[in-house]
Image: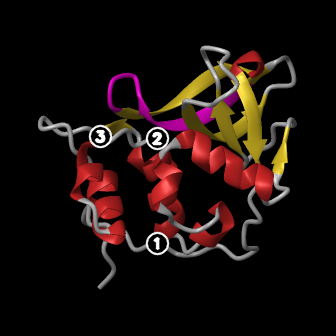
């Protein structure tokens, strides 16, 4: 699902469809134009009926350090990259993550390939990243079934 979102995502007014969805869901319009790295991943999981694998949708998850603590508290954090895990990036080495993405591939050489929202000035993009920039990984319990997503439109609401 995330791969279908690749490209520019931030609107001219600073809002995104992920922020719109998150703001509506939690009842706070301030999130419409917020940083959307976590909200984009949660939106994709919601669209594919996998949001519980990411811990559900909570206001706190939009703030990446809070979402990281959820994984630690749930005993689902790890230092090992693997496809489908959530990478928590600490680029400035503070001990708190400031960005998040989903692992597509562990290259086995100290680098990973991720898909990230709110990167490259408002895009969703596939990125190559150094493991040295990762604080840790959330390890979702993905459901075993694949969910068919109906193509068409750009709405995040189901009919």
How far from the left and from the top, in percent, is residue 37? 46, 41
All told, the count of numbered labels is 3
At label 3, counting other C-alpha atoms closer than 10 Å, the crowd grade (few under 14, some 14-19, many 20 or more) is many
How far from the left and from the top, in percent, is residue 2? 50, 50
Q: Is tag 3's residue or tag 2's residue first in the polypeptide sequence? A: 3
Q: In the image, which disc is placed on residue 11? A: none
* SS for dot 1: loop
Left of 4 or right of it: where is 158?
left
Question: Which span is picked out in magenta?
Answer: 112-122
Q: Which residue is mark 2?
A: 37
Q: Which residue is mark 3?
A: 9
Question: Residue lying furthest bottom in this view?
Answer: 159
Q: Nearer the viewer, mark 3 or mark 2?
A: 2
**What residue is drawn where x is 22% and y is 57%?**
29
Q: Is residue 118 magenta?
A: yes
Depth check, front residue: 145 or 86? 86
> On screen, 101 above or below 59?
above
How far from the left and from the top, in percent, is residue 11? 18, 39
Q: In the image, which disc is placed on residue 149? A: 1
Labels 1 & 2 near each other (Cβ < 8 A): no
Q: Which quadrant of the figure contains the C terminus?
A: bottom left
* SS for dot 2: helix
Rounded to the nearest whole Å, what is the CA distance between mark 3 and mark 2?
Answer: 11 Å
Residue 155 found in image quarter: bottom left
Residue 134 appears in the figure:
yes
The secondary structure making up most of the magenta span is strand
Q: Nearer the viewer, mark 3 or mark 1?
A: 3
Labels 3 & 1 near each other (Cβ < 8 A): no
Q: Nearer the viewer, mark 1 or mark 2?
A: 2
Rounded to the nearest whole Å, what is the CA distance between mark 3 and mark 1?
Answer: 20 Å
Left of 44 or right of it: where is 82?
right
């Amino acid at each position: 699902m995330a791969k279908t979102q690749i490209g520019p995502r931030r609107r001219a007014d600073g809002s995104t469809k992920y922020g719109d969805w998150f703001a509506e869901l939690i009842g706070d319009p301030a999130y419409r134009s917020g940083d959307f790295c976590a909200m984009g991943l949660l939106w994709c999981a919601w669209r594919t009926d996998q949001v519980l694998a990411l811990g559900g949708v909570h206001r706190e998850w939009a703030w990446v350090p809070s979402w990281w603590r959820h994984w630690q508290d749930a005993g689902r954090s790890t230092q090992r990259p693997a496809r489908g895990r959530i990478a928590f990036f600490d680029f400035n080495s503070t001990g708190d993550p400031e960005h998040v993405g989903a692992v597509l591939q562990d290259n086995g050489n100290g680098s990973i390939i991720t898909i990230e929202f709110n990167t490259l000035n408002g895009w969703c993009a596939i990125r190559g990243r150094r493991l040295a920039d990762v604080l840790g990984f959330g390890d979702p319990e993905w459901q075993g079934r694949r969910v068919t997503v109906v193509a068409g439109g750009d709405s995040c609401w189901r009919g």
